[in-house]
Amino acid sequence: MRMGRIAALLCATLLVGACAGDRPASCGRIVAQPGLPSLIGTGPSAPAAKLNRLILLPPEDGRSIREGMAKRLAALDAADLKKERPVRILALSTGGAWGAYGAGVLNAWRQLNPDETGIELGGEKTWRHFDVVTGSSTGALLAPLVYLGRPSDMTSLRSNYTSISDTDVFTERSILSLLWSDALFDTAPLRKRLGRIVTPALIEAVAAEYRSSGRILAVTAANMDTGEADVFDLGAYAADDSIPIETRVRGFIDRIMAASAIPIAFDPVFVDGCMYTDGGVRQHLLVTAEVAAEVAKAADLLSESPQDERTGRPTVEAGRLPTDGSVRKAELHLIVNGDIRVTVADTQRGLLNISRRTFTLITDEGLRAGIERLRLLGDDLGWSVKYTDAWDITLPPGPAKEECEPDIVDGRVRPISDNKDMFDPCFNKKLFQLAFDKTCARKADVWEDPYQSPGPLFVDNATSQSVRGSCAANAD
């Protein structure tokens, strides 16, 4: 998609306005006083200030997550009486085509950590290395396959992110059709592609794993009607046998599409009468208060909801953290699909150039704030917080050694240049392979402290070949 064409479409939209039809239904989630709930504590060691950095769901929405977490923790306690094995939470960020980075890291991590398998489905065992898997935007596309984690799921993850192109995600709308549209592009191709992945068999597999383990699979989308970040508990939804399987398939796809519907570019998605767009509008990285509270053994008090007289919002009291060693430690793994640093550049004048730079800065700040919020949460609750991003994936200076190479700026893989497609299979394939090789080489050190990055890892052809042996099989 050439940027000039995007600019023309955007300008046309601004000039003619929107003449879209009426919405299909009213959002039943709208309340008299909407807004994110706040939390207050009951003592000096209360986790109130800690949990208020997280999304707290309405009681009906949060119940399934709390019940699932309680079941998972009980299973861990039964298998590990000394509580040596930490609860592992994986949060997959926004990032568009850069989701190939997360796909590469997780394919390698799966091969480096093949143990902790679950039930057998379709002749393969699920992977229970992570107890909670969440995603926002492109992270929502990654999450279901990572949650199951069977070899075939990881292969599907790789093939989808290394072969995807613009035509697999969207089609251009004519200037005339924009008069009746909600977005610049039609994402019917992405829905069709998801339909080949999210089948009745996959829904049944997610449901079986959820019922067996209680592990959480959740994605977030921005509710345009309430202004809140809503969370879809996909595990519980898949396991709801009261809903016909065909409806669950459509609903599962709807929720993933909603979580990845980039505003203005992609159509919003209606779920239960509410309009949703990309989860990154509100949350780049998702961890809910219900998950944290269950791990911290403070969930028993989270159901109380008096009104805060000053704000008019629900207020939730949380109890003190146990100090007797009864709380299992937690590891929070954050995968940033991209990097959290903005290159210094002379921004050219013009509506498109300034808009694009502004979007880059806003996205970067959202990721930084998300990482900082979760790092502080980890400090408060005694959790280990680690992250990985693509900043330290580099290529050696010099001419390209392969026919298919991504853009290189100052020796580093950089986003697609202005005259390239938004989703370039060449770029994604290279990014996936470099992420895979980096993870194989560093093993556990691929997860960094958010403020102690180890610096660039230069990967040339020779190094790439040598580090692949660290994994059970390479990504090619």
Image (cartoon, helix red, strand yellow):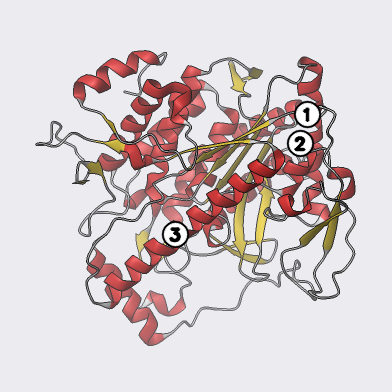
Mark 1–mark 3 Cα distance, whole angstroms, equals: 34 Å
Q: Amino acid at mark 2?
A: Val
Residue 125 as seen in the image, left or right of residue 337: right
Residue at the disc numbered 2: 295
Res 57 → quadrant: bottom right
Mark 2–mark 3 Cα distance, whole angstroms, equals: 30 Å
Q: Which element carries disc 1, helix, strand or loop?
A: helix
Q: Amino acid at mark 1?
A: Leu
Residue at 61%, 69% in the rendered image: 224
Where residue 185 appears, as percent x and y from the top left, is 39, 64
Q: Is residue 250 above or below residue 472?
A: below
Q: Nearer the viewer, residue 23 or 401?
A: 401
Mark 2–mark 1 Cα distance, whole angstroms, equals: 8 Å
Residue at 21%, 27% in the rendered image: 460
Quarter occupied by the C terminus: top left
Q: Which element carries disc 2, helix, strand or loop?
A: helix
Where residue 305 appears, as percent x and y from the top left, is 88, 60
Residue at the disc numbered 3: 363
Q: Amino acid at mark 3?
A: Thr
Residue at 76%, 29% in the rendered image: 72
Residue at the disc numbered 1: 73
Label 2 environment density (alpha carbons within 10 Å; few <14, some 14–19, many ≥20) = many
Q: Which residue ends up furthest to the front in the rendered image?
A: 44
Residue at 44%, 64% in the rendered image: 362
Q: Which element carries disc 3, helix, strand or loop?
A: helix
**Front position among marks 2 and 1:** 2
Where residue 462 appears, as percent x and y from the top left, is 20, 20
Q: Nearer the viewer, residue 468 or 373?
A: 373
Whether pointer 2 and pointer 1 mark residues with C-beta atoms closer than 8 Å, the reply is yes
* Chain-order first, disc 2 or disc 1: 1
